[in-house]
Image (tube, grey):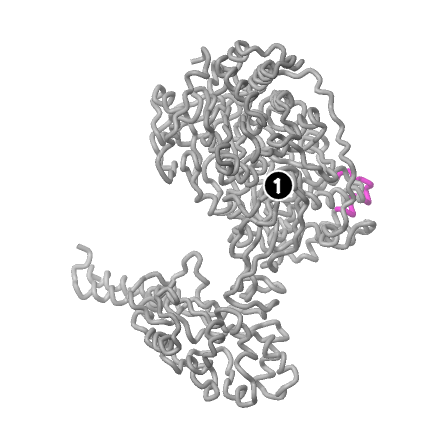
Amino acid sequence: MVFRSRNALLLAAFFLLAATTACEFKSPGQPKLGDDSVPRSRWGTSPVFTPARASFGEAFRQFIGSRPDPVVQPFDFSHQIHLTKGAVCTDCHTAVEQGPRASLPSVNTCMICHSQIATDRPLIQQMTAMSEKGLDFQWRRVYDYAPESHVRFEHAPHIRAKVECSTCHGNQAEQTVARRMVNMDMGFCVNCHKSKQASNDCLTCHY
Amino acid sequence: MDRRHFIKLTAISGTTAALAACGNPENQVIRFIPEEELVPGLSTWKPSVCPLCNAGCGVIARVMEGDAEVFRNGQAGVIRMGLVKKLEGNPEDPISQGKLCARGQAAVQITYHPDRLDKPRKRSGERGSGQYVDISWDEAIKELTGQLDALVAANDQESLAFLTRPRRGRRLELIAQLLQRYGAPAPVTFELFSDEVLRRANAMSFGAHQLPTFDLENSRYVLVFGADFLGTWNSTVAHSAAYGRMRQGRPGGRAKFVHVDARLSQTGANADEFVAIRPGTEGVLALGIARAVAAHRGGKPDAGSADYTPQEVEQRTGVPATKVEQLAREFAGNAPAVAIIGGAPLAHTNGLFNAFAVNTLNRVAGSVNQPGGVSFIPQGTQTPTRPLSEIVAGTPPKVLLIDDVNPVYGSPGASKIADALKRIPFIVSFGSFIDETSALADLILPDHSFLESWVQASPESGSPKGVPTKFGPVMRPLYDTRPTPDVLLDVSRKLAKPLAGLPTSFEEFVNAEVVRRADSMPIDDPGPWSETPQFDGDAAQYPYHLIPHASQALYDGSLAHLPWLQELPDPMTSGMWCSWVEINEKKARELGIAQGDLIEVTSTQGSLRAPAFLSPGIAPDAIAIPVGQGHTNFTRYATNRGVNPIAILAPTIIPETGTLAWAATRVKIARVGGPDESLILFGGATRERPDWTHGRGDQH
């Protein structure tokens, strides 16, 4: 018997747990350690505890539903300023009417206006410098579903059905960087589908 | 310190070390601005051509937005870009007809391979040591132009040689033009499973120096000599599609398919009837059938087949006379019938005779240029090339450029290709991977993957409607690589005396109008040839024929670096990630060899050890080893895995074509140990059991 003392065993187990929670193991096919740019972590609550994650820590965080709010973004973008000045959602989230994802704009999109507008602001100058170096933002995802929920959400059909962006994303004109304003659980989806007489068949969303 | 404290301390220090070693580093990965605007989540399908064999199947690539680790301006980072996620056959393409083989499906892994060369390198250590330093493209091109200028200064342009694969369409044409303008001799080509013998025979029989196209769809009887035409030989995707229609596409008109071989390949296993034959005597059987067909038709027997009576054929080939008569009756009575030869029968010293004999059979049966028979697609210009033996045997060139070909792996050890290459003072390699050949290079200038470059193919067979195809890149390059044809053009402009009259880019060259001229390949006089195959190794001392065969997954070994294909079970043995020696199960029992036992295979040239696979699908006097494994230096997936049967082959050359007679080696085998777990099988054993006794004559 190696562990004669029960305390030593517990201590070792605790430290091992602490270490794995903090540690991101590198495994083949997974993005590199600390590579936050790749949307790897899906910050949804998982109904099942599964180790099928990049790390034990991630599995644990997902299981208990711990997700940071607001998501720390690489740049202090303000939705409020842009929306009050008359920009609309589709100006930047250009793919929302065409595909499953609304798309997160690249610096190129920003520079369409900001090569002319507000060029004296420090943040804009910071962004222009990035653009000149060919560097882009590493936007972090705010909304997503846990992979094992098998939800396939598509924006385009919702836009075609005239669902307002704010129905799911709240009033972004009140926000700087985007925050989760609406609790998008299954009840939220099902209620809206009911009221709009959209299909509530499981396979409409889960496949 | 007592034991308890020691354990506690170990636990604590261990976890502390683990904590210190990981966590989130401060420095974040660089993200570049996307170079293209894509709708995330939507896919587009873009056309391209599969480069893995000479079939030239048209493919479509599914391109979707994704994050990729790339090189931009000498910096590594992440970019959002259109990435190829999947390859499928192009429904518009007359060759692939919307289908694609397993190898083509795996071609997408070339682009994302973890061991793909991502920037130019220069050798820093000993040759073959694998020590390289990164250099910039400017430096690399300067280095190459310096070497070429030195040859010009010494008035020694003849000492530049270019080694590539045959049949590369416009790419090869451009290389040939460059060499000609520089003053160097024609490009040298190498291909292990070369079909040059068949091309030569077709030139002699039909005046077409090319591979034949079969109208299987309309055939009523197909007699195949050795050709694995559904797996690895010629245009397999086109063959498979036509084969499906031949067997099931005509209600009531299901054609019969007979396979003649010394080993039951996947294609042979599909046949209605399998005829076992003594290796190398396929031509005699073909002429025997041709003679009987002519007799059935009531005509005079063909001049060449006057002597091939069924009894003589039985005595020479081991196929019973009654079987010869039955095959002839069926062949004559089921027009249109077609005979096909390929694979091992062409790789004997009498390969040209075998091919010519099958051509004669087709001609006697009236199957040439007829529906349901054999025909030839009109070809464009054929670029003249030289065989590898010219630079190995002759004066070694001073500068050798190698474009994605691996003769060191694909040649018998006795050919001493590696030694010959080591004598060349300066070698440049353009391939995307380090392999046995490019490991000898002084300078490595990695090419784009085919998905990142302009591609072009001029299929020589597969469909009567076959047309040359050309397509642009389907995705942006990931790394700091450059397309080889453009690098060569760049070099040609930067020489001290720039070469004139060349296009500015490969894109321009591919899109330029092709000037077609009639194929004027001279038809050789067949001359006196031997009908009897010669084998290396005395039959008493080396009692078994060694049949190396193209692997369904790894082809000629050039695809062993793709893990999907390593993982693909062989259709006959279900072997994967390994090599095996296929041996007749009854013979093995006699020798006390069990499944998985380690056996040593020895030829006059050397020996190798691999596990035994007991199979009913191989002649008792033959063993078969798939080609593809046994690489000594070819990425993390292929290196030091399995054995390479080519290494122990005798360097016997087919005299008429100068190509390797890879089926002309005899070997002996000995059990050297029990199972060593190197035999990895996916599933059960072969269930089909051909009768080897009837065809073996008095040998066994």
Q: Is residue B535 visible?
A: no
Judging from the image, what secondary structure is the residue with disc 1 in?
Answer: loop
Quarter that holds the N terminus of chain B: bottom left
Q: Is residue B201 visible?
A: yes
Q: Residue at x 72, y 35 (%)?
A: B385
Q: Is residue B75 above or below residue B97?
A: below
Task: Tell me the quarter of the picture where residue B425 sits.
Answer: top right
Task: Tell me the quarter of the picture where residue B618 sits.
Answer: top left
Q: Main secondary structure of the magenta part?
A: helix
Q: Residue at x 43, y 23 (%)?
A: B669
Name the residue nearer the viewer: B575 or B224.
Answer: B224
Magenta segment: B148-159
Q: Residue at x 56, y 60 (%)?
A: B44
The numbered mark 1 sits on a residue in which chain? Answer: B
Instruction: Return the residue at label 1.
Output: B405
In the rendered structure, the answer to whether residue B151 lies left or right of residue A120 reads right
In the rendered structure, the answer to whether residue B498 lies left or right of residue B304 reads right
Task: Tell me the quarter of the picture where residue B198 sits.
Answer: top right
